[in-house]
Amino acid sequence: MLETSPESPAPVRVVSEALKEYVDRLGAIWIEGEISEINERTGMAFMRLRDTSVDMSLSVMCHRTVLASVSPLPQNARVVILAKVSFYTKNGTLTLSAREIRQVGIGELLARLEHLKQLLASEGLFAQELKKSLPLLPNRVGLICGRNSAAEKDVVENARRRWPAVQFEIREVAVQGSAAVIEVSAALRELEANEDVDVIIITRGGGSFEDLLPFSDEGLVRLAASCATPIVSAIGHEQDAPLLDLVADLRASTPTDAAKMVVPDIAAEIAAIEQLMARAYRRLANFVNTEIDRLTSLLGRPVLRDPSILITSRAEIIQNLRDRSHRSTSHAVNVASETLIHTLARLRTLSPQSTLDRGYAVVHRGDGSVARDSQDFSVGDGLKVRLAKGSLGAKVSEIISE
């Protein structure tokens, strides 16, 4: 470790040699990337090894024999390189010297994608509860597509055919190759930051497995998962399944299908509104007719035709009650009268007066008590004789025994 200070700085030569010593200790390393450029010269080949997820590349050189072992390499081929890092102290440059080059095959890429898919799934990035609903009528639709692509025309034309007033915020980017991930990610960040954009469509037409690889890039997938704006993925055809489809809020099988998902059909919406209006009119008309029938029924009742019937009907009831009360009272009086007459007749029959009226008399002693035995009197005692009419005073002149 170099010890330096402002008073005791290290010379360039010493720093260069220290860097060379440190780099030499690194040894040979395996590097993965995408070959974006190859220049072959006499005995040597110079390449640019690019990282598709970021705008970064390294310069790699090798003998033509090393390159010939994997030639011919297709455009934007993904490779792994065993290289030795060298630092040249004379001009301060860093060089990667390739010792072995291996092209990454489809099978290995599929295995890596499957591993990445399982990793992202374990983190919950594909969970259904994270999916956001699309707005019924977006204010502005963000569209990420290729430059002058058929996918762009399909989305725009079909969306405007369904809803003519729809507005687009279009970002044309590279949708395959080494720059695809960087440009798509930048466009996605820009549209996500735009508050007027309510939904984002990421689309491109069909292509080979390698052409669609940028849409399975881990960085792009994680960026899409972090977006608050709903994302519709329309990559390739029905059979294509990049990882972006799994993290998107909605997957469309084609760009045309994406347009149908994002905006409603104005003709269908107008028809639905007309149906709702017709249903509302029928409901309201039925309600009004029901209330009219109810009012008509109420108006047809006698009490509403002649409100005084409330009084007259009660008057009749009261009169009937009065008549019944009068008849009941009269009957009770008549029965009582007859009972009294009969009682009086029996009373008269049993009365002493009746006995007197038949010629009998009642004899009272001087103290007013009724005489019942002649032995209770003496000659000369005073008597009072009560007749049917009037009374007589008398004296006992003779006592006669039976």
Image (tube, helix red, strand yellow):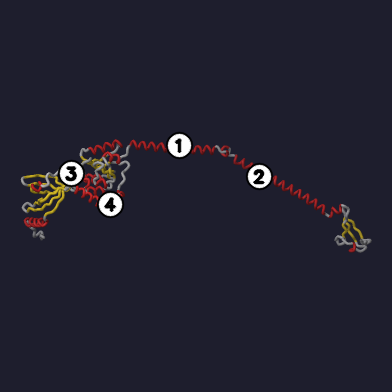
* Residue drawn at the location 11% of the way across and 52% of the way down: 83
For marks 4 and 1 on the same chain, the one whose residue lies earlier in the sequence: 4
Point out the image quarter for the C terminus: bottom right
Figure quadrant of residue 174: top left
Distance from Cα at disc 3 to Cα at disc 2: 109 Å
Task: Locate residue 145, reporting x and y percent.
Answer: 23, 41
Looking at the image, is 232 positioned above or below residue 398? above
| Residue underneath mark 2 | 321
| Residue underneath mark 4 | 124
Looking at the image, is 371 positioned above or below residue 150? below
As drawn, the label of residue 325 is none
For discs 4 and 2, the disc positioned in front in the rendered view: 4
Q: Amino acid at mark 4?
A: Gly
Distance from Cα at disc 2 to Cα at disc 1: 49 Å
Q: Amino acid at mark 1?
A: Ala
Distance from Cα at disc 4 to Cα at disc 2: 88 Å
The secondary element bearing badge 1 is classed as helix
